[in-house]
Amino acid sequence: MSRRTISLVVLAAVFVAILWFAPTVLLLLFAGILVAVFLTGGGDKLAEWLGLSRVGGLALFALLLLAAFGAFIAGAAPFLAEQVDQLWRQVPEAIASLRERLQSYSWSRELIQNVEPKEVASQATSSGMSAVSMAAGMVVSLGNAVIVLFLGLYLAINPDAYVRGFALLFDPSLRPRVRMMLRESGVALRGWIGAQLVSMAVVGVLTWLGLWFLGVPLAPVLGLLAGLLAFIPNLGPILGAAPAVLLAMTEGWSLALQVIALTLAVQTVESYLVTPTLQKESVDLPPALTIAAQLLFGVLFGTLGLALATPLAAAVLRVTRIFYVKGWLDDRRASDRMDTDPARHPT
């Protein structure tokens, strides 16, 4: 067995072992790579516009992000925190109101009666444990967010060193191709992040304005929630629309239907106009492939896998198209045609 084959087998075995025993590590590493791609993309643009060095552009971009975050905390955060608190209190009330409305229909009354009172009581008695679990989950999530942030910052400061270091794990004959694959993955991720940020902003602003026009309460925080959840294509908008529909139902079915129509209109603009226009050059993800990747990673790795499924699919798809389809299959087909050409094999 050659050194090239041995290196591939060893790395594949290590990857499968980590994926089997600690998949969250790989997902957090990929999240850190996303942060690094975002930071380097913004830093490189500033360096190009202002004539700075790469590190100078990265530092300036990080400072601008910190300043923007500080301004948001000082200005909009108190208002949004109050709205989030109201949303937290009104959603259960909206669910109770929906339950009362459904009681008036025979088909839904039987469905509601399937919920046993004993089960509801047992869930109520375990609310204290649920609160503790929720608090522990928030602490873990905050710790993971800090890890991802610092990981992305370190990767963004000197990405070439990590690319070269990862390539050294392969046989020398494979190292140039590995470095090229990593660069192409970075191109795909940068294009996806840029397009996704614009799409999230469009979804958030249009949802906020539409809900405000319809008179739905808490329109700003609902728009912000819709914009943030738009990071998860296809499934995120459904999750983001649910609180708005529930609150609209307290005002009547007509308003709820208008909110659903608004959500469909916003998603049509985002899915068929904004995203294809922004992603057509860097990455083109078929909707069916996106949903399949989300379902697979959601089942295997939970919420974190669902959130990261789309950018991971974008990177894998670009690398597959360039190095497997065009670089190997198409070249092999061309060589096969040449080998079977009668002109090359005269009798």
Image: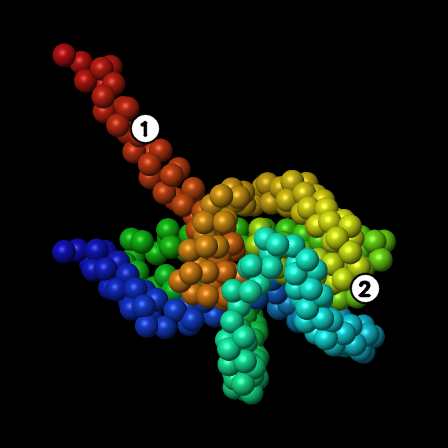
User: Which amino acid does the dot numbered 1 rest on?
Assistant: Ala
In this image, 39 relative to 206: left or right? left
Q: Position of residue 78 (x, y in %)?
A: 80, 78
SS class, disc 2: loop
- Residue 243 appears anywhere in the view: no
278 up-or-down from 153: above or below: above
Name the residue rendered at 42%, 71% in the picture. Answer: 24
Q: Quadrant of the C terminus?
A: top left
Q: Which residue in the protein does label 2 denote?
A: 217
Q: Looking at the rendering, which quadrant does residue 171 occupy?
A: bottom left
Q: CA distance from mark 2 to mark 1?
A: 62 Å
Q: How is the image coloured?
A: rainbow
Tell me the crowding category of disc 1: few under 14, some 14 to 19, or many 20 or more residues within 10 angstroms, Cα based.
Answer: few
Q: Nearer the viewer, residue 187 or 121?
A: 121
Which residue occupies the foreground of this view, 70 or 1? 70
First in sequence, mark 2 or 1: give its number. Answer: 2
Q: How many numbered marks does the figure carry?
A: 2
Q: Secondary structure at mark 1?
A: helix
Which residue bears the numbered disc 1?
334
Amino acid type of the residue that numbered disc 2 sits on in the rendered structure? Pro
